[in-house]
Amino acid sequence: MSKKNLLTLSFEELEQTLDDLGEPRFRAKQVWQWIWQKGVTDLSLATNLAKSLRSKLDQEWTVTHPALHTVRESRDKTVKFLLRYEDGALIETVLIPEGERYTQCISTQLGCAMGCTFCSTGMMGFVRNLKGWEIAAQVLAAGTYLRERAITAPLKNLVFMGMGEPLLNWKEVRSSLDILHHPLGPDFSRRRVTLSTVGVRGILEEFAAAGLGLPAISLHAPTQELREQIMPGAARLPLGELISILENYPLRPRERVTIEYVLLGGVNDSVHHARELVRLLARVKCKVNLIAYNPGPGIEYRAPTREAILAFEKTLWDKGMTAVLRKSKGQDIAAACGQLKTEVDQQIL
């Protein structure tokens, strides 16, 4: 009989499993800490557990992380992983250096159904949702990488900005957040977690009410017409309705909604577009992250010129809007969402 993976259990399920084994439920806290905070895969290292308990667990259970299929390290210290799950699915996650710490970009789906025309993941179409533990286990894989290389810079922030639309897999994303926020697990606070979404009616409001992270809205167009052209799936939620939700988004003091805006050369990067964006966001408590498009294989869009980027950014600042040009990292390792998996798939074909 093949062993089952302890990572697939929620904390409550782990408590019940130990109860079924005749063990006191408080042991769940110890086991949980070993597998989700300390990242062990060998429970013989769990020295505060009785040998009898370790023996019981070893008979039926294992701790199996996603396998490292490909690791690429950039000159700027960005690290991209392609992880293989038990069914053969390949998922991307990225470690991004931010000073003396790391931010990790997390995937929530294999592929994506939104069909954004500038996105390598969008070109794949949708394959399947990731389970909650599969999402959270990306953090374990990154932690193992850092420990094995004696890298002391801590992993401080998580951004759900990888493959997939998180709110179309909200049940499992919420499950992953329960793991990642657990005080005996990775223990990330709300302000250390950002979830990127195009906006999904009803679910965006659920995420807001849950209070498990901060929103980053993939906007990329200042008008409904342009959004329909470049983001056909996202545009199913009318722009006016999305903005209304953001105007009423429950924020704590000093919090703001992040607006993500990829500058596509000659498409959405003019001063006119910038002025339209200012008008659109006039009543939203927000900051704007500008991202110069990083061309991917098989996608016809081009990067914006430096002059266009600076003019767009200046227009926002001149109108009193906080705008930050996000520095592109990992270009030498296909770090943009979906690029590495696309490249590996093409090699297999």
Image (cartoon, rainbow, N blue to C red):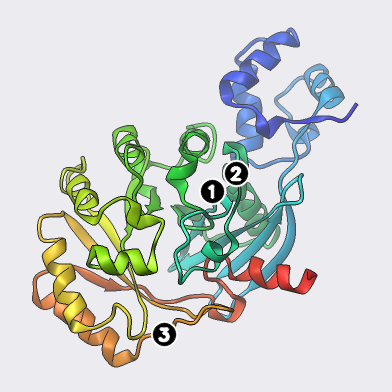
Query: Which of the 4 image quarters holds residue 189?
Result: top left
- Where is residue 80? Give x, y as percent: 61, 66
Please report contact status of discs 3 and 2: CB closer than 8 Å, yes or no: no
Mark 1 belongs to which amino acid? Thr
Reading the chain from its start, which is encountered first: label 2 or label 1? 1
The residue where tag 3 is placed is: 303
**Please, what secondary structure does the residue beneath circle 3 have?**
loop
Reading the chain from its start, which is encountered first: label 1 or label 3? 1
The residue where tag 1 is placed is: 108
Q: Nearer the viewer, residue 332 or 171?
A: 171
- Where is residue 27? Give x, y as percent: 65, 18
In the depicted structure, whether residue 28 falls above or below residue 214: above
User: Which residue does the image show at 72% across and 69% down from the upper left?
Assistant: 344
User: Which residue does the image show at 75% across and 41% down from the upper left?
Assistant: 64
Quarter in which the C terminus is drawn: bottom right
Q: CA distance from mark 1 to mark 3?
A: 27 Å
In the depicted structure, whether residue 70 falls above or below residue 306: above
Please report contact status of discs 2 and 1: CB closer than 8 Å, yes or no: yes
Mark 2 belongs to which amino acid? Leu
Q: Is residue 45 left or right of residue 241?
A: right
User: Which residue does the image show at 36% across and 45% down from the upper left?
Assistant: 200
Q: Is residue 329 left or right of residue 319?
A: right
Reading the chain from its start, which is encountered first: label 3 or label 2? 2
- Where is residue 112? Give x, y as percent: 53, 55
Crowd around label 3: few <14 · some 14–19 · many ≥20 (10 Å): some
Q: Is residue 349 left or right of residue 137?
A: right
Return the mark for residue 130.
2
Q: CA distance from mark 2 to mark 1?
A: 6 Å
Q: Is residue 281 left or right of residue 224?
A: left
